[in-house]
Amino acid sequence: MDFSLIETMRWQPDAGFLRLDQHLRRLSRSADALGFRQPQDAKGKLEKEVSGETPLRVRLVMTYRGKMEVTATPFEPIPEETVWRLKIAKTRLQSEDSLFRHKTSRREPYEAARAEFSKDEADEVLLLNERGEVCEGTITNLFAEAADGMLLTPPLTSGLLPGVLRAELIRERKARGEVLKLDDLRQRKLFVGNSLRGLIRAELVDG
């Protein structure tokens, strides 16, 4: 597969694209940082692919030369009472590898981490960095609730993708960046989330 930038977003029949501006801003910033051509009329290309009465998962893939491919598939929102089981991967992220701060087709550590557990064992798998700090899940950012109700989420210095939902929660002062170790997760209410799925209640499953 060619090295490419990826944005995955949700389209709702009644509301259109959720957080579209944030997704397009991240795409543009990543293109700039990695030397890709800037996206041209991404919004128009996305709008062409969506219609109907069903929520959609919309994936935009952009090549180095700025060629965009958009695919839309039906999306089943996750029921509110859902609790995802989290496991910890042996695979580590390197906090100094700035490439993982961009959503690209380079997904080896995430795929390796996910492959450590079956879907029956874990709904999502968390990766730590070389210092034992919690980074993120294979497809989500992590949030741990503090005593004051604020959501704590690993900072970018731990080495992770700045998710669009994560950025929105920080901007709305519902979340803040804080270095988290595994022990910091044990007694706290946990959530994982991304822009497509929203926030999902989660629990750490040991063993």
Image: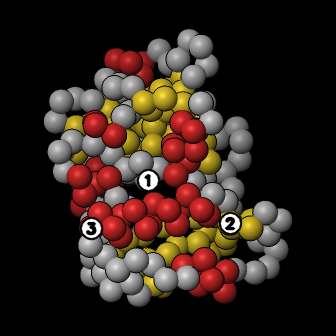
Q: Bin the neighbour count of mark 1 within 10 Å (Cα to Cα): few under 14, some 14-19, many 20 and up.
A: some
Q: CA distance from mark 1 to mark 3?
A: 21 Å
- Tell us which disc is closer to us: 1 or 3: 3
Q: What residue would you read off at disc 2?
A: 17
Distance from disc 2 to disc 3, alpha carbons, whole Å, reads 26 Å
Residue at 78% from the left image edge and 63% from the top image edge: 15
Q: Residue at x 66, y 86 (%)?
A: 48
Q: Position of residue 34 (x, y in %)?
A: 27, 67
Q: Nearer the viewer, residue 74 or 59?
A: 59
Q: Earlier in the sequence, mark 2 or mark 3?
A: 2
Place of residue 93 in the rendered image (x, y in percent of width and height, measured from the top left): 22, 45
Q: Quadrant of residue 92?
A: top left
From this view, report whether residue 110 is shown above or below residue 12. Answer: above
Looking at the picture, which amino acid does disc 3 mark?
A: Leu
Q: Secondary structure at mark 1?
A: loop
- Residue 57 lies, with reference to residue 81, above or below; the image says below
Q: Quick one: label 2, few (<14), some, or many (20+) residues within 10 Å?
A: many
- The quarter of the picture where residue 169 lies is top right
In the rendered image, the residue lying farthest to the top is 147
Q: Quadrant of the C terminus?
A: top left
The residue type indicated by label 1 comes to Ile
Task: Check disc 1 and report the residue beneath it.
Answer: 139
Residue 92 seen: no
Q: Is residue 57 left or right of residue 116?
A: right
> Which is nearer the eye, 4 or 188?
4
Q: Given contact means CB atoms under 8 Å apart, are the residues at marks 2 and 3 in contact?
A: no
Please determine whether, in this image, residue 165 is positioned above or below residue 37: above
Left or right: 99 as drawn, with respect to 44: left
- Residue 198, image x and y in percent? 62, 48
Which residue carries the number 3 mark? 34
Q: What amino acid type is highlighted by mark number 2? A: Phe
Whole-Å distance between the Cαs marked 1 and 2? 19 Å
